[in-house]
């Protein structure tokens, strides 16, 4: 396994060199590569195993629009562990990075939910409907451990409770090293956790720049369906694309990764347009190959018995 050299500073473990990132998404961002993932609504063991073997870069377990049960998340995360791939790569970095979308909006009680999912070992949190910089800051505070006094990234001061043994085990690290690395990127350049704030309302759009500037925010994810509903009271509104362009431009100016939920047919166009990561659908429905097979059979079926007789 690739070596990890560490030193101790002010009682905290700090990595200094020859370290493989645990969170592959950050590695991709730093290399200028756009990651692609999906929302998962099926937190089962078999679903997690299938996603771990997929070409995806990340999966967001959606606890906002499905039943919220932390015990399901625990099973799902374990299923995402691909032992054969770990052995092949020679390091602990998962190919498919697990994140969680919380069920609570930024204006609601979000911190205790963050504590629950982080202590199981997720690599990031997607916070839905963040409308203000104050709500974004509350999310940042909830995801960070208290920092060593005098450290360059002391603020915003973290308030995450210390209860990380299971998360450290899931990452495959000693507890003290997990505590040092489980901080928010890019606020801490060596951090391995991501916070993506979702812009889904008119108010969030108006405050997008302030949200993006909040230290600890590692990405802005635009929610086009809710955003169009907020702007004009219906989906697919004419103002939706203009709003997405504004969000993308602000993120570029503030050097914050900007993401979007898209259909597969739009993916290449949105990357070319400057979006930094994409959520390209959900894990429900039939695979494309199955849908194609059904389509072919139905097309033949619709031709009627005469078509069969001509074979």
Image (cartoon, grey):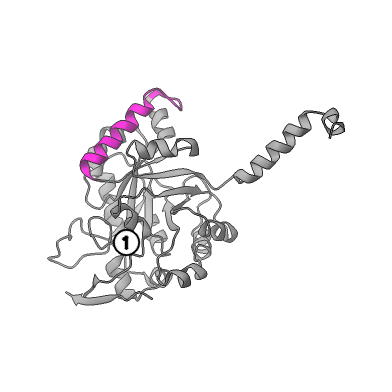
Reply yes or no: does residue 251 show up in magenta.
Answer: yes
The residue most toward the front is: 311
Q: Is residue 169 above or below residue 103?
A: below
How many marks are shown on the rendered structure?
1
* Relative image position of residue 180 (x, y in whole percent): 27, 69
Q: Secondary structure at mark 1?
A: loop
Q: For the point 39% across and 32% down, which residue is it?
A: 227
* Prevailing secondary structure class for the magenta stretch in the rendered image: helix
For label 1, count other residues whose C-alpha is less than 10 Å away and answer few (under 14), some (14-19) or many (20+).
Answer: many
Q: Nearer the viewer, residue 67 or 84?
A: 84
Q: Is residue 111 left or right of residue 296?
A: left
Residue 111 sits in quarter: bottom left
Residue 59 visible within the image: yes
Q: For the point 55% across and 61% down, which residue is it?
A: 49
Residue 28 sits in quarter: bottom left
Reply yes or no: does residue 156 show up in magenta.
Answer: no
Q: Quadrant of the N terminus?
A: bottom left
Q: Nearer the viewer, residue 267 or 188?
A: 267
* Relative image position of residue 12 (x, y in whole percent): 22, 73
Residue 286 visible within the image: no
Q: Is residue 307 left or right of residue 62?
A: right
Q: For the point 20% across and 55% down, which residue is it?
A: 156
Q: For the point 47% across and 70% down, which residue is it?
A: 88
* Relative image position of residue 35 (x, y in whole percent): 39, 50
Q: What stretch of residues is rendered in magenta?
A: 232-255
Q: Quadrant of the C terminus?
A: top right
The residue most toward the right is: 309
Label 1, on which residue? 192
Q: Is residue 66 above or below residue 207?
A: below
């Amino acid at each position: 396994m690739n070596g990890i050299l560490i030193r101790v500073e002010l009682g905290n473990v700090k990595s200094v060199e020859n370290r493989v990132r645990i969170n592959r998404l950050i590695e991709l961002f730093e290399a200028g590569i756009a990651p692609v993932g999906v929302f998962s609504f099926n937190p089962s063991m078999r679903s997690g195993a299938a996603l771990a073997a997929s070409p995806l870069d990340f999966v967001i377990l959606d606890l906002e629009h499905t039943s919220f049960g932390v015990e399901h998340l625990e099973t799902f995360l374990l299923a995402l562990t691909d032992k054969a791939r770990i052995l092949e790569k020679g390091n602990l970095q998962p190919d498919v990075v697990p994140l969680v979308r919380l069920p609570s909006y930024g204006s609601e009680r979000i911190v205790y939910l963050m504590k629950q999912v982080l202590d199981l070992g997720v690599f990031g949190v997607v916070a839905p409907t963040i409308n203000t910089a104050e709500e974004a800051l509350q999310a940042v505070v909830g995801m960070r451990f208290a920092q060593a006094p005098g450290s360059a990234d002391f603020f915003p001061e973290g308030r995450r409770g210390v209860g990380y043994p299971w998360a450290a085990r899931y990452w495959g690290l000693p507890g003290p090293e997990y505590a040092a690395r489980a901080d928010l990127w890019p606020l801490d350049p060596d951090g391995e956790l991501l916070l993506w704030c979702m812009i889904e309302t008119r108010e969030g759009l108006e405050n997008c720049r302030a949200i993006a500037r909040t230290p600890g925010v590692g990405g802005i994810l635009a929610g086009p369906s809710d955003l169009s509903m907020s702007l004009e009271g219906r989906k697919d509104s004419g103002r939706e694309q203009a709003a997405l362009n504004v969000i993308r431009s602000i993120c570029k100016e503030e050097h914050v990764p900007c993401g979007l939920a898209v259909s597969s047919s739009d993916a290449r166009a949105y990357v070319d347009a400057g979006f930094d990561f994409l959520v390209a659908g959900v894990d429900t429905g039939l695979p494309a190959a199955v849908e194609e097979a059904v389509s072919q059979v139905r097309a033949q079926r619709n031709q009627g018995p005469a078509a069969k007789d001509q074979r």
